[in-house]
Image (cartoon, helix red, strand yellow):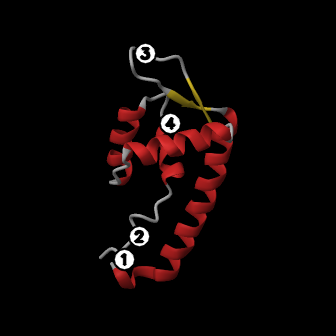
Amino acid sequence: MAVKGWQRAQDPALLVLTSLAAGPMHGYALIRDVETIAHVTLGPGTLYGVLSRLEEEGLVEPLPADDRRRPYRLTGAGAAALRERLLVTSAVASIGLRRLGPALT
């Protein structure tokens, strides 16, 4: 059973950075990959707002356009920030699951 609203609480920036860890992607490919890995649908407005913010922060960079599509890739700083966030998230998830124990299987 999911808690109402938790899907919205998933951080779009984290999802985009995680998707780009697989390699450069354009907007539509990012939307599809995020749907695959997190079962979350990012609208174009959300996606491009996130990409703009991540670019300003130096975490992603645009590549030359391929036809009409502009791919983006993770920068070194983006990879480091993603690794740090995933390690913290993993630690919290591990502690939470351990505290729940086998009672909720």
Q: Secondary structure at mark 1?
A: loop
**Label drawn at residue 18:** none
* Residue at the disc numbered 4: 20
Looking at the image, which residue sits at the far left? 1
Q: Quadrant of the N terminus?
A: bottom left
**Label drawn at residue 3:** 1
Q: Position of residue 35 (x, y in %)?
A: 33, 47
Q: Give the amino acid type for the residue marked by disc 3 in the picture.
A: Asp
Above or below 101: residue 31: above
Upstream in the sequence, badge 2 or badge 4? 2
Upstream in the sequence, badge 3 or badge 1? 1
Q: Position of residue 45 (x, y in %)?
A: 42, 45
Give left or right: position of 41 versus 85. Answer: left
* Residue at the disc numbered 2: 6
Q: Position of residue 37 (x, y in %)?
A: 37, 48
* Residue at the disc numbered 3: 66
Mark 1, residues whose alpha carbon is within 10 Å: few (<14), some, or many (≥20)?
few
Mark 2, residues whose alpha carbon is within 10 Å: few (<14), some, or many (≥20)?
few
Whether residue 102 can be seen here: yes
In space, the residues marked 1 and 4 are separated at their CA atoms by 28 Å
Above or below 25: residue 50: below
Residue placed most toward the observer, 56 or 103? 56
Q: Give the amino acid type for the residue marked by disc 2 in the picture.
A: Trp
Contact check, label 1 and label 2, Cβ < 8 Å: yes
Q: Nearer the viewer, mark 3 or mark 1?
A: 3
Contact check, label 1 and label 4, Cβ < 8 Å: no
Q: Give the amino acid type for the residue marked by disc 1 in the picture.
A: Val
The quarter holding residue 2 reads bottom left
Q: Quadrant of the C terminus?
A: bottom left
In space, the residues marked 4 and 3 are separated at their CA atoms by 17 Å
